[in-house]
Amino acid sequence: MKVNAYTTLDLADAVAKGHDFETESLAVVNATADREEPDYVRLQFELDNMTEDHLPAHMEEIRLAPDEARSIAADLEKHAQRVEQATDEEE
């Protein structure tokens, strides 16, 4: 997968799951909003389908109101802290 534009995360680990398959892949993840007159936040991700046989090339996009984006950001922060604490305890 060629990353040829700015994205929030250029190469993140991802998993595509379906009824009869599960495939690990790389993905790009992006959080953005329109530059002029934004009316929602877009959370986008795209898996590298060069190694994926079950999904055609496509990009997923979730459109979020500002309060929804903040709710996801708060949950991400909470879970990131849990993972960091667990990792610190293992060391």
Image: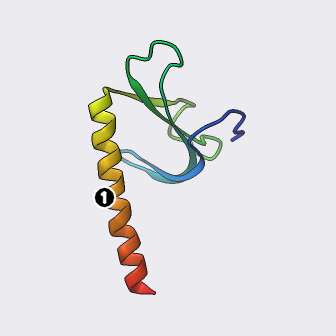
Q: Residue at x 65, y 35 (%)?
A: 6
Above-or-below relation of 13 to 10: below
Where is residue 33 drawn, in percent x and y?
47, 24
Identify the image quadrant of residue 87.
bottom left
Where is residue 85 drawn, in percent x and y?
36, 75
Q: Residue at x 38, y 45 (%)?
A: 18
Q: Residues within 10 Å of mark 1 (few under 14, many from 20)?
A: few
Relative placement, left or right, of 16 versus 68 is right
Relative placement, left or right, of 45 versus 4 is left
Q: Residue at x 35, y 65 (%)?
A: 81
Q: Secondary structure at mark 1?
A: helix
Where is residue 73 drawn, in percent x and y?
35, 45
Which residue corresponds to mark 1? 78
**Residue pushed farthest top?**
37
Give the residue type at disc 1.
Lys
Above-or-below relation of 37 to 3: above
User: Can you say which quadrant of the picture contains the N terminus?
Assistant: top right
Q: Residue at x 34, y 36 (%)?
A: 69
Type of colouring:
rainbow
